[in-house]
Amino acid sequence: MSSRKGLVVAILAAAALNGIKTDGDYLEFSINSKNFQVTENFKLHEFLTKNRSNTFTRINANIIAEVQTLRSIFGSAIGISSSYRSPTYNKSVNGASSSEHILGNALDTYPINGNIKGWKSTVKQFKSSGGTGYYKTFVHIDTGRTRTWNG
């Protein structure tokens, strides 16, 4: 079993142990759900939608495993500025109509220490599949089809 797959299994097991609903590889929760350490460096609530009027969140354990793996390589804290977006919320923030955020497969990430150049370099070197978008202040990562763009 690959270490990524093992991490996905561990994330899903931790979710189940903490009363979080799972659907395949997806975790479903809200702001009222128990917050707990879902990986070595991330707590569950860090993956909450930023939509404060409806905090239902559906997030793929594979994207959680990916950001944890990249964060471990980077060696410094990573923040999440966007995760799951309902279709209505995605439209309100001018997200792409086919955004992986709507499916719970995407995260917009940034380095807490401000080293965006180092974070971009780490993602570029170690992310080999899925989508990657490089922006001035954050990096979009997703588990969709492999593609790269500059925003």
Image: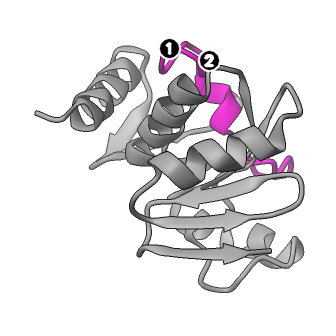
Name the residue that disc number 1 marks.
Answer: 40
Kindly identify the residue that appears in the image at 51 percent across and 30 percent down: 68
Left or right, 24 with respect to 75, comes to left
Query: Which numbered disc, 2 or 1, marks the residue that appears first in the sequence?
Result: 2
Measuring from the top left, give residue 21's x and y in whole percent: 40, 36
CA distance separating discs 2 and 1:
14 Å
Q: Secondary structure at mark 2?
A: loop
Q: Residue furthest bottom?
A: 97
Which disc, if any, is residue 35? 2
Q: Is residue 6 visible?
A: yes
| Contact check, label 2 and label 1, Cβ < 8 Å | no
For the magenta stretch, what is the residue range? 32-56
Measuring from the top left, give residue 45's x and y in whole percent: 67, 28
Front of the two marks 2 and 1: 1
Kindly identify the residue that appears in the image at 52 percent across and 60 percent down: 142
Q: Secondary structure at mark 1?
A: loop
- The crowd level at tag 2 (other Cα within 10 Å; few <14, some 14-19, many 20+) is some
Name above or below for residue 56 compared with residue 35: below
